[in-house]
Amino acid sequence: MGSMTHKKILIVEDERDILHLVKHYLEKEGFRTVVAMTGLEALKKVTEDKPDLVVLDLMLPEMDGLEVCKRLRSAPDTAMLPIIMLTAKAEESDTIVGLELGADDYVTKPFSPKTLVARLKALLRRVERTPETAPNLYRYNALTMNLSRHEVSLGKQEVTLTAKEFGLLEYLLRHRGRVLTREVLLNAVWGYDYYGTTRTVDVHIRRVKQKLPLLEEAIVAVKSLGYKLKDVDEPE
Ligand code: CA
């Protein structure tokens, strides 16, 4: 994992103490760091410094972490940028926090720097493990997808998917654990010259779930953004 320690992390936090604590721990672990104290500054730093991952506080002046996250997810260059959201306990009232905000993961305040570093490394591993091109075979619990034979099966039962459903499932499996916007999925599966709407993605996700019930809970909708196939070993 030698490459991981050279990764550049953007820390966005308006509370100086937390900012310095996180920065200190990440640097101690060998990461390079860039910092921002407002949402607008965060967007600027993403463009200028091209970080490999963003640690993003939810409550920020000018523009909150949710808006920053949405803007990053909706720009093609940053749609796949790994984001860990820092949320406060008080905001944790329902499951809206974190994943539904479009972040790849979230850590609740107060947190131990050790926990944050562990989650950050886990996310970087998920990203690094994503193959550039599709491998020949995917396994996801009882699901097997064989690309060379163009077959999907649940246990020993073969499941028939249309070409688009197959392409969608392949992309979700390859990028498991990542938030994928409808635009990203549309471009990946239907192509840039496709003139349909992003509703197409919703319809196909629904069909894939109907055919493969084990994915009903595993593919989560990310509010107003898109979808994510939970990693098998991902914490709840
Ligand atoms: Ca804050």
Image: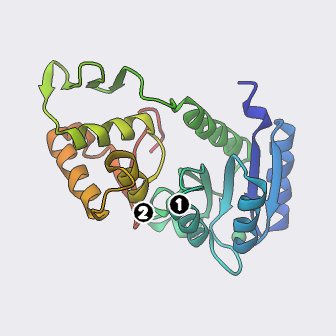
The residue that mark 2 highlights is 225
Residue 56 or residue 15, whichever sits in front: 56
- In-front residue for pair 35/29: 35
Residue 183's image quarter? bottom left
Residue ID at (27%, 62%)? 196
Residue 163 placement (x, y as % from top left): 21, 38
Image coordinates of residue 32 in percent, x first then y, are: 83, 44
Amino acid type, mark 2: Leu
Q: Residue at x 84, y 36 (%)?
A: 30
Distance from mark 1 CB to nearest ligand 1 atom below 8 Å: no
Q: Are marks 2 and 1 in contact (CB under 8 Å)?
A: yes
Above-or-below relation of 35 to 155: below
Q: Which image quarter has ligand 1?
A: bottom right
The residue that disc 1 covers is 73
Dot 2 crowding, Cα within 10 Å, few <14, some 14–19, many 20+:
some
The image shows residue 153, relative to residue 199, as above or below, that is above
Q: Position of residue 53 (x, y in %)?
A: 67, 48
Instruction: Name the residue furthest front.
Output: 193
**Residue 110 seen in this snapshot:** no
Name the quarter where the C terminus is drawn: top left
103 sits to left or right of 32 = left
Q: Sequence order check: which comes first, mark 2 or mark 1?
A: 1
Which quadrant holds residue 90?
bottom right
Q: Amino acid at mark 1?
A: Arg
Say whether residue 213 is visible: yes
Q: Quadrant of the N terminus?
A: top right
Q: Position of residue 208 (x, y in %)?
A: 21, 44
In this rendering, the answer to whether 1 lies above or below 45 is: above
Question: Which residue is pictured at 43% across the width and 65% down the height?
Answer: 94
Secondary structure of residue under mark 2:
loop
Q: How is the image coloured?
A: rainbow
